[in-house]
Amino acid sequence: MQPSSSSSMAIQVVSISTIIIISIFFRKYFIKKTTTNQPGLPPGPTPLPFIGCTIQMLLNRPTFRWIHKLMDHFNTPILCIKLGPSTHVIAVSSPNLACEFLRKQDVVFSSRPETLSTYLVSDGYKTTILSPNGNQWKKMRTILIHDVLAPPMHKWLQPTRDDEANHLLSYIYNQIEKKDTLTDGGLVNIRNTSQHYFGNLIRMMIFGTRFFGAGMEDGGPGEEETEHVASVFIILKYLYAFSISDFFPWLRGKTDFEGHQKIIGTAIQRVRKYQDPLIDERIQMWKDGVRKLKEDVLDVLINHESPKLTDQEIKAQILELMLAAIDNSSNAIEWAMAEMINDPTILKRAVAELDKEVGHNRLVEERDLPQLNYIKACIKEAFRLHPFAPFNIPHVSMRNTTVAGYFIPKGSHVLLSRPGLGRNPNAWTNPMRFDPDRHVDAKGKQVVLSDNDLRMLSFSTGRRGCPGVALGSTITTMMLARMVQGFSWELPQNESGVNLVENHDDLALAKPLVVIAKPRLPHYLYPKTENDEEDDRRQSQESLIDR
Ligand code: HEM
């Protein structure tokens, strides 16, 4: 193994060096400067012919930090980096410019890049989020908007969401009861809890089941759900990972230089091994006439008429919905909780709002959410300051155009920087401070989590804007409201504060947040899990027999 891998490394080094030398030669002798009136590209590093800035990119992982450093270096809110022979990557960090792209020229920038990862995940662009602009994207987006995420469907699925919000409380309560005494509280891993809350929710909405397997006795995820959610996060990590073959398309499928193809292929297979058999089984049930009532999103997709969806489209779209529903919301919950625990005045304000609007004698419900402006402001502040991903999902220009006096060639990948917008000192005062009040209107106007002016990027806007705003806002706010109402939260005894540092490779909190929860409502308000109810039934039967 060893000799062949070192010789292949040597070949790679020689090839790259050759390409660089040829490129420099080519540049020096064959490229004449053209003097036309065409506007110039946005500022950025000088690309080499054929490879562009690929070598710099490879030497400066993670790429998102390199791009942000370049924006600082060139002191520009719009940067152009050429990668490979023909792809211009345009990074943007100012709200005004972002609006030029996604509002003023929304139609021009409404496509997506074609990459190996997105091709594999969407099963050849059969889905919505990842598909380039075209009939298939339009068809799938229309179905999602009208038949999956529309207000009547949102209402129809409310009992499912309520069920999961109850499950959340009983799961945390059980974790405390299992390990510690209720009065002393118990340690809760907020990252695990939130990722599995949103994983459970989307599985319940789509499949009508929380668990692929038996789950755990305390209501927590079993090994199937743990693998499912972990694989979803792996797919998200490698979806737009600046892989070489994204910029040298002829390499796709021929060489897996960085190993991304293997990683993402395995993760897709791990997610689909749980989902696809359930989908096949359900399709068969409808064919055989043994299922007659639509009870979840899968039933809706299977029975969709004009257009009828193929089995492959249903499977690919469901995988994509899993990717859409877990990451942003769970990351916002973890950061919001971390910031709130570090600044007890913020946590106290949130608790006071819940005590005032809901009280201690019942659990907060979805109908309370319009009144919970401070809780919503905490979530919005987490989206602003601590976005899950460094960039919005890439948009691609469908023709040559000019933005803010710069030439943007057809096929450019436009990346709106989420920290660039949300932490922009020209748009926000004291941008690095977690301050929910900045979103609260003195006149009592409802706080909404979206921002159509793109001063921050939560749900984005325009033709490609998130169609899951209502669902995403509801489930994220509901989770924080339940956590804050149901438990008091504090740091473990030996810790003086949460270290609010993000990872180097992504924007997640560097160390998962693990804090102490203590129940703060009357005992009878904590819902029981199915297992608890089963135990109660058994105990009462046993006591009957004893008598
Ligand atoms: C807090 C939760 C969520 C946040 C912050 C969020 C944010 C976003 C963002 C930033 C985009 C990209 C917009 C663009 O390209 O300009 C997007 C796209 C999308 N989101 Fe969400 N999302 C959330 C939840 C959901 C949920 C729950 C669903 C559905 C179950 C969903 C479905 C979609 C779809 C289908 C797209 C692709 C739209 C298109 O390309 O046409 N999202 N979302």
Image (cartoon, rainbow, N blue to C red):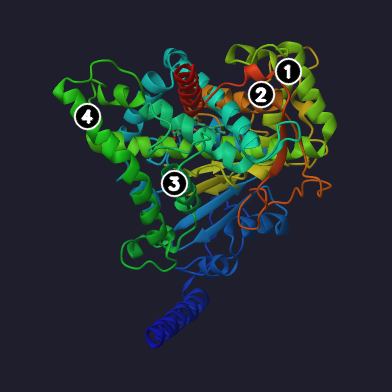
Q: Which residue is nearer to you in this view: 258 or 476?
A: 476
2 and 1 marks in contact (CB < 8 Å): yes
Q: Is residue 127 visible?
A: no
Q: Which residue is mark 4?
A: 283
Q: Which residue is mark 1?
A: 354
Q: Which residue is mark 2?
A: 481
The secondary element bearing badge 4 is classed as: helix
Q: Residue furthest bottom?
A: 3
> What amino acid type is highlighted by mark number 4?
Ile
Measuring from the top left, give residue 191's x and y in whole percent: 61, 42
Q: Nearer the viewer, mark 3 or mark 4?
A: 3
The mark nearer the N terminus, 4 or 2, is: 4
Q: CA distance from mark 4 to mark 1?
A: 44 Å
85 is higher (above) or lower (below) than 152: below
Q: Is residue 266 visible?
A: yes
The mark nearer the N terminus, 3 or 2, is: 3
Q: CA distance from mark 3 to mark 4?
A: 26 Å
Q: Quadrant of the N terminus?
A: bottom left
Mark sitting on residue 223: 3
Measuring from the top left, give residue 40's x and y in whole percent: 58, 53
Q: CA distance from mark 2 to mark 1?
A: 7 Å
> What amino acid type is highlighted by mark number 1?
Leu
> What amino acid type is highlighted by mark number 3?
Glu
4 and 1 marks in contact (CB < 8 Å): no
48 is higher (above) or lower (below) than 542: below
Say whether mark 2 is within 8 Å of ligand 1: no
Q: Residues within 10 Å of mark 1 (few under 14, many from 20)?
A: many
Q: Nearer the viewer, mark 3 or mark 2?
A: 3
The mark nearer the N terminus, 3 or 4, is: 3
Q: Residue at x 79, y 29 (%)?
A: 347
> What amino acid type is highlighted by mark number 2?
Ala
Measuring from the top left, give residue 103's x and y in whole percent: 55, 30
